[in-house]
Amino acid sequence: MKPVRTARCWLRLPEEAERSDATAQTPSRAGPVFSRSLLVLGCLLCLPLPAAFAQKKKADVPDSDCLACHSQSDLKSAKGRSVYVDAAKHKASVHADVSCTSCHSDIHEFPHPSRMARVNCAACHEEAVADFVTGIHASQGSDSCRTCHGPAHDAQPASSIGPQQCAQCHAAEVKDFAASVHATAAKNGDGQSPPCQTCHGPTHKIRTSQDPASPVAKQNLPATCGSCHSNPDFLAKHNIPFAHPVEAYKLSVHGRAVLAGNHSAATCSDCHGSHGILPSRDPLSKTNHWNVPATCGACHKQIETDYHESIHGQAVTHGVADAPVCTDCHGEHNILGPREPNSLVNAARVSSVTCGRCHGDERLNARYALPADRVPTFSDSYHGLELRAGGQSVANCASCHGVHNILPSSDPRSTVNTANLGRTCGACHPGAGTQFAIGPVHVLSQTRTEPVSVKWIRLAYWVIIPFAIGFMFLHHFLDFLKKFRRKGPRSDSGQTVLRMNLNFRIAHWLTVVSFPVLVITGFALKFPEAWWARPLLLWESHFAFRGMVHRVAAVVLLASVAYHFVHLALVRRDRAMLRYMIPGWSDLRDLAGMFLYNLGFSDTRPLFGKFNYVEKIEYLAYMWGTMVMAATGFILWFNNLALRYFPKWVSDAATALHYYEAILATFSILIWHWYTVMFDPDVYPMDRTWLSGRASADHLRHTRPDYYAELLKQEKVQSKREAENTPETETHKPAAEPAQSDD
């Protein structure tokens, strides 16, 4: 066999200059004589072989025949390229079951043709080649397949081609990937760890990241990452503590911007990295707490600069782990624009949800010696109450302290520095602080920051309100028990007398309409979370409905008082009622007598005149309360003028006085007035005088006999006048009811 193999090799020597894989053995080092002798001997031995050999190769050329020459390690083509085939590697390759002529299909005989076609991989790998020519790696040219798969005779299965093969061109990316959380998971045997193809797509279809069809294109990255990170089981298995991170990102301001075609908006790789993704606990991770400002600053450069100069940024620089970074205020995957209702930095939420999360934390305040009153004082202020009610046009924490550039109040650049308060407040209240310095803003009741005026108002009403409510309740409770134990029904003849003329009733109707509205809309601001307040606050985020209704009701109430006094000024007869409203010593005697009577210490019930002490107290309290509420209400309504011309403590005092007086007035109506006109057994279910102007004659005869006699006298006078003015044809008509009183 040795001479035959040598002969075959020798026969191929004349073909070295042709374009084929025919090769020549390296010439022997023996002398010329020996070489010529060997050559002649070879020719003689091979003369009968060429025709038979060629005929056999046409019919069947086994790989062993090819390897007879190509297994020689130093075999080269005419162009000097090695055409050596390692039989062992070929047998272990993916092409082990493919014969040589399956790829080199134009070789049917020996010697080889002078021109041989290039091997066409598409003959077997049609789909892969079709995908490959549209991918980014097609730019590598005709040797692209060999670059990744290696020599065709040694080609390995696709499953064995990993990052090490990609590293031939992408060394930096593969190095980053090797240190990433994904590669670490693979090393630890995690079968769900992603290789290159998981993110970049099938090997032959890999496209540049700028290609819209690429899985790693900006608009496609959420779906690519979501193939794993949208799976709840995957998140649970790998202890990833975020619920629906990909879905949250898609709804975020960044996700929507990317989807809309904004390629400068952040996507997964901008924040987490591409190949070198590390867990957030890793100090080198882009999402590590200490690195978040720099990560966000890659897009928001000026904001990063402002943040690093702020009190929060300085705290982070000095290693304060509790200091907030971007994600603490804005969120992580679900970042929303400040105008969106669910945003953590929305005007309605930033104070309570975002700033309040840290500044309302008792442990953080104690740890860093932060003022503990900031959140509760703001929450109970007008600004805080209006925000709790859903208002969008009032100041929040960021309005006064800034957003990213928050500085301590001692810093001259701070917006809440004493020297800058006028300008800060003046942004919403023009002229604020021009006449007087702005006083303390965060004022907590019963502390040294509370103005003296507010303190004394609070203490006064803490005495007045319990005493007044207790007195009213005790008085009416004893009266109710006395009448409840009374034997037999009260006589009711059905007769009535006119007690309130139309002018008095109009003033009363205006009060009846406006006062309850004032109470409900006023306390809805103070208690915005109450169930009865919510219907009034449904429109607050778009329109200050509650405030508008409250102010309209205030105008109506003042109109009722104005109408009442104009009426008294113009009608002399009705003006006389003011004289009867002046309290005297007799009222104190009547009050003492009623208590003795109701307690059973006296058998005689006091009798009253035109107005009893209950009505006098109510009328005077109503007028006083209206003046107090009007004065303080105007200070709060026209707050810009108040802050321009008065010290801030005046507004604080007006707020306290308005609130406490509202409580007193509300309970006065509920207990004092409603019992008198509705729940008193003598008038139950209602004294309808305020509707028709006519009162029960029996009730007046029983409780105010002198006043009732006076009404009868007036009736006779009025009847006489009407008779004198009535034509003779009408003199036989029935007599009218008692005349209108001057009440």
Image (cartoon, rainbow, N blue to C red):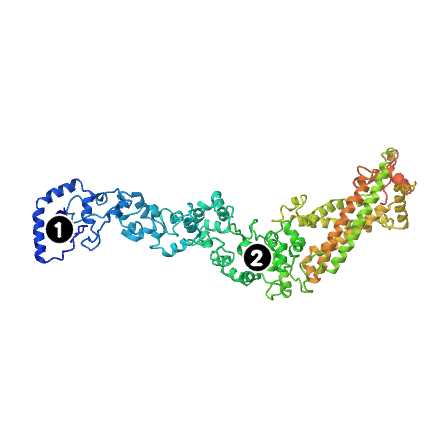
- The disc, 1 or 2, on the residue closer to the chain's N-terminal end is 1
Q: Residue 676 is drawn in which quadrant?
A: top right
* Residue drawn at x 30%, y 46% as measured from the top left: 129
Q: Amino acid at mark 2?
A: Asp
Element on which disc 2 rests: loop
Let me know if residue 567 appears in the view. Answer: no
The answer to whether residue 227 of the structure is visible from this angle is yes
Numbered circle sitting on residue 87? none
Figure quadrant of the C terminus: top right
Left or right of residue 135, residue 678 in this image: right
Residue under numbered circle 2: 322
The residue type indicated by label 1 comes to: Trp
User: Mark 1 sits on what residue?
Assistant: 10
Q: Would you place residue 253 above or below residue 694 in this image?
A: below
Q: Position of residue 495 (x, y in %)?
A: 86, 35
As rendered, which of 21 and 726 lies closer to the eye? 21
